[in-house]
Amino acid sequence: MAVTHVPAINESLMKSQPGSFAVDMLWLLGAFGLWWPVLAPEGYVRMSLPVQIGYLFAASIPPTLPAAFMVFADYPIYGLYELAPRVGAVSAGGDQQTAGLIMKACSDPILWIAMAIIFFRWQRAEARADREAAAPTPQELPS
């Protein structure tokens, strides 16, 4: 994802429809690659629950760099983007800032909610294991 935000790469790909499609497909494949270790179906290798939490936390860090550049840049980062037709009265710079904010403000809560769900599943599994370990065995029951 970060590579597709490098201005030289982005501008060279976004000049054509196939290049724009390639960027979209890279983002889609990147999303599948990001979530596969966490959401893989049963029968596939998955990370342990605590590792999944750390993995998703680590995944929230890289998008910070392109988002920060987009939000705090004084001018549009992508020259080609400045030439795109404007929608309404939104400037290219304002649109870029909004995109950077959305990149962080919408993706981070998804990752944090997923981490919370995994944490509570992990806690529930640990509590169940503790209950099973503390349960008396048939030999320990009074006759």
Image (tube, rainbow, N blue to C red):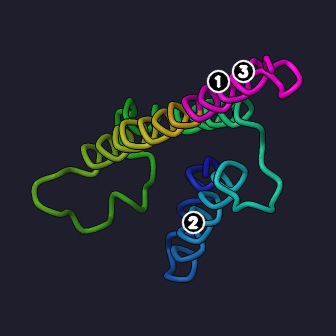
Q: Which amino acid, mark 2?
A: Leu
Tell me the magenta residue range.
119-143
Q: Could you tell me how far apart the alpha carbons at marks 1 and 3 are, in whole angstroms?
A: 5 Å
Kind of element beneath mark 2: helix
Kind of element beneath mark 1: helix
Mark 2 or 3: in front is 3
Q: How far across and down, in percent of the image, does residue 136 sit?
A: 78, 21
Q: Residues within 10 Å of mark 3 (few under 14, many from 20)?
A: few
Q: Do the residues labelled 2 and 3 touch (CB within 8 Å)?
A: no
User: Which residue does the numbered mark 3 point to in the structure image?
Assistant: 130
Q: Are marks 1 and 3 in contact (CB under 8 Å)?
A: yes
14 left or right of 127? Answer: left
Could you say which disc has been placed on residue 23 in the image?
none
Q: Could you tell me how far apart the alpha carbons at marks 1 and 2 are, in whole angstroms?
A: 37 Å
- Residue 58 is a magenta residue: no
Q: Which amino acid, mark 3?
A: Asp
Q: Residues within 10 Å of mark 2 (few under 14, many from 20)?
A: few
Q: How far across and down, in percent of the image, does residue 90 sit?
A: 16, 52
